[in-house]
Amino acid sequence: MNVSGKFYLLRRPKLVYCIAAFIVFMGGAYIYAFFRNISNMVMFRFFPEPSFLATLYTPLQTDSIWSCMFVYNLPYGLWCFSGLLLVRGIWLHNEKWRVIYGGIFIAVVMLYVILKIPGIIPGTFDVLDLIFMGFFAFLESIIFNIFIRRNLL
């Protein structure tokens, strides 16, 4: 394989962003579906519960803060990261629309968490969800500025 073929995906950053967004989203979905007790998930108030999820459930002891963060907060951070990767991938070469849609995405995600406080959105408010989302948003901007922006200039 020649050098240009070896770095084919680096020349296709939109494709890489979209693939990465899908992989990160599926990672968050995997944690959410397989490590959390599905009997009290809000999602299954609206959609029928798949019967196979009960057999795939792997209970984790959430007796430490790290395991609780892994099970309850990490999926939200990964989903935020995934959405930002997708927004960046779609509007990679159009900074104006990327900023607009990225801002709208962050606002909707943050509102989803904040509206749990008054009970408008069902669920439990957790400030660590906001921290994880903010961390992964910051991580996405660092990845872009270090690895991608240099190649686009």
Image (cartoon, helix red, strand yellow):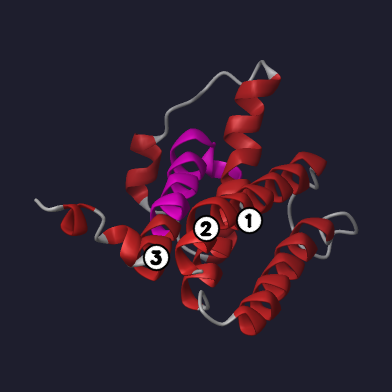
Q: Is residue 56 above or below residue 9?
A: above
Q: Tag on residue 13?
A: 3
Q: Please identify, in this view, whether the residue under mark 2 or under mark 1 is nearer the observer.
A: 1
Instruction: Give coordinates of residue 138: x percent, y percent.
Output: 68, 50
Counting other residues with Cα less than 10 Å from the Cα at mark 3, is it few (<14), some (14-19), or many (20 or more)?
some
Instruction: Give coordinates of residue 79: x percent, y percent.
Output: 56, 54
**Residue type marked 3:** Pro
SS of the residue under disc 1 = helix
Residue range corresponding to the magenta coloring: 22-40
Residue 43 in the magenta stretch? The answer is no
Instruction: Give coordinates of residue 47: x percent, y percent.
Output: 49, 64
- Among the two numbered marks 3 and 2 on one chain, the one whose residue lies closer to the N terminus: 3
SS of the residue under disc 3 = helix
Towards the viewer: 22 or 68: 22
Residue position marked by numbered label 2 in the rendering: 82
The residue drawn where x is 77% and y is 48% is 130
Q: Main secondary structure of the magenta part?
A: helix
- Among the two numbered marks 1 and 3 on one chain, the one whose residue lies closer to the N terminus: 3
Q: CA distance from mark 2 to mark 1?
A: 12 Å
Q: Is residue 128 above or below residue 13?
A: above
Labelled pair 2, 1 in contact (Cβ < 8 Å): no
The residue drawn where x is 34% and y is 59% is 10
Q: Quadrant of residue 9?
A: bottom left
Counting other residues with Cα less than 10 Å from the Cα at mark 2, is it few (<14), some (14-19), or many (20 or more)?
many
Residue position marked by numbered label 1 in the rendering: 141
Towards the viewer: 62 or 78: 78
SS of the residue under disc 2 = helix
